[in-house]
Amino acid sequence: MKTILRLLLIYFGTLLSPIVFGTAQIPDILIYQGKEYNLNSNPLEPYFELHPDKRPQEGFSTALWRGYIATFEITDNKLFLKDISILASKDSLGKYIHYRKSVKDQVFPGQEKILIDWFTGLLIVPNGRLKHYVHMGYASTYSKYILIELDKGFYIQERRFSAGEYNRFRHKQFLAFKKTDNYKKIFDELSKDKNNTADFIDSFLEVY
């Protein structure tokens, strides 16, 4: 799994980095059109790849391998960061209390509104009832999805899918990805492990 994670970080960055661990992950949060959603994408990951010294150094858990929970908001057709928090605990009268501690000022000191202008791609937003829980990353499935397309942090469009429509869309995107050099690089690397069959590699990459 660590090898797969390293490769996905290199080749895919933000969309895939935290989801390959064998524990369901606490999602980032998106405020969109006045509603709060869980987010199956992590737009801060490209920033932390370029600035690893900025990544919060505490707050990691098996349910939060990336180490933080980010809250975003789309306003004025742009994606902004509202907060970054970590999982923290403190001793109160002999009992440990767990809470979320804001570390936004440590990561972006003196900045109130941070435009996520390094992010180009799709935000994946589950928007329906939970259909099937999977105890791994963001692999659980939902009855509906919203996909929001951004270009350097600027809103382009949204598309809304049923579960079946989303799965067909994802499969179409994967077939397109299979034609790229990045797919070949990942496939060749994962194939070095003889336990990884071609069908396993493709099914894994399509899901994630």
Image (cartoon, helix red, strand yellow):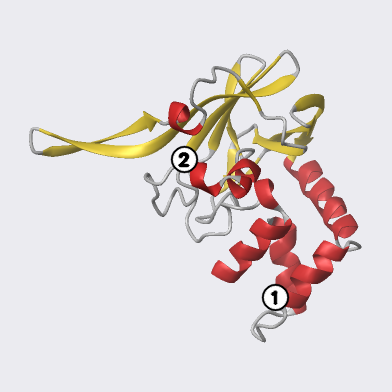
Other-residue count near label 1 (Cα within 10 Å), few / some / many at <14 / 14–19 / ≥20: some
Observer-nearest residue: 175 or 58?
A: 58
As helix, strand or loop, the secondary structure at mark 1 comes to: helix
Question: Which quarter of the picture shows residue 203?
Answer: bottom right
65 to the left or right of 116: left
Point out residue 19 in the picture as x, y percentages from the top left corner.
Answer: 58, 53
| For residue 154, above or below residue 195 | above
- Residue type marked 2: Tyr
Q: Residue under label 2, please give it.
A: 68
Q: Residue at x 55, y 68 (%)?
A: 2
Observer-nearest residue: 47 or 130?
A: 47
Point out residue 200 in the picture as x, y percentages from the top left corner.
Answer: 70, 73
Point out residue 28 in the picture as x, y percentages from the top left corner.
Answer: 54, 36
Observer-nearest residue: 54 or 62?
A: 54
Other-residue count near label 2 (Cα within 10 Å), few / some / many at <14 / 14–19 / ≥20: many
Question: Which quarter of the picture shows residue 126?
Answer: top right
Of marks 2 and 1, which one's residue comes earlier in the chain? 2
As helix, strand or loop, the secondary structure at mark 2 comes to: loop
Q: Residue at x 75, y 69 (%)?
A: 186
Q: How many marks?
A: 2
Q: Residue at x 61, y 64 (%)?
A: 6
80 to the left or right of 160: left
| For residue 169, above or below residue 176 | above
Q: Residue under label 1, please give it.
A: 190
- Residue type marked 1: Leu
